[in-house]
Image: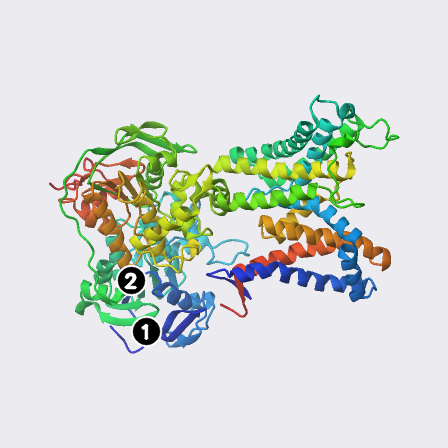
Amino acid sequence: MRLESRTEYSRRAMLFAPIVAILVTLAVCALLVAWAGAPVGQTYALLFDGAFGSRFAFAETLTRATPLILTGLAAAVAFRARLFNIGAEGQLYLGALAAVAVGGMHGGSTFDLPLPLLSALMIAAGAAAGALWLLGPAWMKLKLGVDEVVTTLLLNFVALLLVSMMLDGPMKDPLAMGWPQSVALDPELEFSRLIERSRVHSGLLMAVGLAILMWLIERFTTFGFALRAVGANNRAAAFAGLPVGRTVLLCALLSGALAGLAGVGEVAGRASYVTTDMSPGYGYAGIVIAMLAGLHPLGVLLAALFVAAVQVGADSMSRVVGVPNFIADVIVATALLTMLVATLLTRYRIRWGRA
Amino acid sequence: MTESLPALRLANITKRFGKLVANDGISLELGTGEVLALLGENGAGKSTLVSILFGHYVADEGHIEVFGQPLPPGNPKAALAAGVGMVHQHFALADNLSVLDNVLLGSEPLWQPFSRRRAARARLIDTANRFGLGVNPDARVATLSVGERQRVEILKALYRGARILILDEPTAVLTPQESESLFTTLATLVTEGLSVIFISHKLDEVLRVSARVAVLRGGRLVSVRNTEHTTKTELAELMVGRSVTLPTREPRPHGDLVLSLSGVHAAHAGKTLLDDVGLMVRAGEIVGIAGVSGNGQHALADLLCGTLAADRGEVSVSGQTMRANPRDWIARRVARIPEDRHAVGVVGDLPVWENAVSERLHLPAFSRAGIVRGRTARDFTRRLVTQFDVRLSGIDVPARVLSGGNMQKLILGRALSVAGEGVTPTLIVANQPTWGLDIGAVAYVHRCLLDAAAAGAAVLVISEDLDELFAIADRIAVMFKGRLGPALPTEGCSRAAIGLAMAGSTASNTEGAPLHAA
């Protein structure tokens, strides 16, 4: 068996690749469900029901999708320029921390500003924190050739420890009875609810808006062209006179900012304070989402919805049948692997037998 | 020369890759003690045929016999054992090992307590003497010239008992003198009873070395000719399938000084790339840079494309000192044609239209406030594609799917319209502009360069193909070890003299062979 490069990639094959990948994933995971002794059909039905079956379920899925869209976009834009940002998790935490630092310290009166300005400052601070956290690794990659996969991944732990230090120190909530939890955001700075009696917040609109914006940038701007050219062939990009270094740095700022905004959304839209377990791996899930989406910003919306649905649905399903909700992680991880294979098959065809 | 038992017999070899038929029912015999030239353009199926012979590919149909014995398909070891040896265009030698070690590498088992060096050494010297391949077995390969390395590769094959030797474009990396010496070696090999397949697309050398010529075109064997009874013109027509006339140079007036280099020095990681390089090119003039690959041509091209900074010295275009920034060069209307089309010329995964405007996307012509003017860019690309005869199914296909010739036309179009339509570039820097192109495309590229010069552009062509430089350059300079010799008028330059300069001899130390006879 060997792989033969396809001369022309079919657009249809590229569109169908994620769908086929997800179907294969569900088929593979059906084996695990059956192994766990649960009826496969009922399990998947419950999973679907738990994600989309009721107003409440759907609202929960959308709430979960909000940070995932942003971390997915963060990974997608960075990967497009071959900047492998594995650090969205840390950037998310720092974004959340910066948001609270602006909008929560001294009861939100750190800065004496009118509310709309303070709100904008809070969002900007979160984005900037994430962006600056990624700037270092991007700069080291450009100037010193340091592998950004290693630096961004390791900085996640640094970020988490930094957050932990702040939660036990200057940003500790005195009313939290000793729980490591930050002071709360000024309630007036919290995002508004989109749906009555649910947790869906206007951060979702921000995420969807940013996905559309990212698509417009990639598709219609000179920066977007440079981004794609640098990612696809940076020698040719440099020869054509494109500013390779500036493009990579700008891309890092964008990617970090998107991940930081995911943190802002979690604080301002959902939790209102920072804890060290506020993200169940949103940053890492963003990588899977970006890959499932084929790095396409609009595809990220669908991929994030899929991952959110699997996670929310699995929680609800596990309460009914005896399949642990870890199946959600298995499904998401399997989806990444099948998607990688599917992408490979859009580029190569398998030939059986010898050359 | 066909003897009773052919050394090699290919019967009805067919190989398909998807829809492409790379070899279409090829039957061919190689006589013992014969040099058979395999002539054809890129993509004619030469490499596929040889890969099948050597066991890298399995033919879909047909079979091979070596000295009357059928050769099992898809087994390089069997091919070696049957006495088929191959010398690739790019040598597979370890620089840090001696000649002897390189020859032994892979020919003796890995797991044995002692390598039998003394016996091997004697056998190597014996083989070398028998075939007139004088090489010091203890010399480190790194210290050898390209021609000597090729001799080591041939020795390696002979040491392993090759009786049929396949040489893939063997002269591509050699100076004219080294090529001559290779031809002498081949003559010796043949008198010793070896059979040789000589793959080439250069007509002169095919006529020079072979007894018979097999011409491939589009995967089919078009004709087999006795070399004595054929001509260059006939072979060219057989190879291309139609008659092609290459454009030639006509006298042109030369204008103002455009490109000027003086005392340019560049180094990378402690290695000198350019050493005191000086050069002047006037408007309307074509200057050719000859040299064996790896003597600083890359650095010179990078310098003149704005991607390499000189450590010392002055680089100016039309009197303006140039910085190492491609956009500066583009802004000064310098048309740049890089050596490696796929890796540097285009971004293969992006559509043709984006590649066509990539150099000037930031200019107001193609973008405003960072937003690409898509319609303008596409209209421009459509005109470019028509004007430069780029054959494609649409301007939205990825550039990667273009053939070599069409990709080069796209790059040429992008470079030559560097100043916008209807304006001639000030300077054209073309590095190996026709490498790997078929004759039709070569003629097109030469025509473009000659026309641009006639319209007043200064043109610098860096090429390893001397025929190309003699065809279009007004003056030729030779690069050796980062130094550039004087650019002297092509009339009166002899190939022999240029060959010597390419090997590092200067007029001062080889009296009687000055670069310029005049």
Disc 2 packing (10 Å; few <14; some 14–19; many ≥20): many
Work out whether residue B120 or residue A73 is closer to the camera in this orientation and state it: A73
Residue at image point 43% right, 65% down: B80
Q: Position of residue B106 (x, y in %)?
A: 47, 57
Q: Amino acid at mark 2?
A: Leu
Work out whether residue B385 or residue B468 is closer to the camera in this orientation and state it: B385
Residue at image point 30% right, 49% down: B433
Please tell me whether mark 1 or mark 2 is closer to you in this view.
1
Residue B41 in the figure: left or right of residue B497: right
Find numbered disc 1 in the image and state the secondary structure of the residue it sits on: strand
| Dot label at residue A35 | none
Residue receiving disc 2: B189
Work out whether residue A249 or residue A99 is closer to the camera in this orientation and state it: A99
Residue B192 in the figure: left or right of residue A235: left
Q: Is residue B126 visible?
A: no
* Disc 1 to disc 2, C-alpha distance: 21 Å
Work out whether residue B275 or residue A40 is closer to the camera in this orientation and state it: A40
Find numbered disc 2 in the image and state the secondary structure of the residue it sits on: helix
Residue B121 in the figure: left or right of residue B175: right
Q: Number of callouts in the render?
A: 2
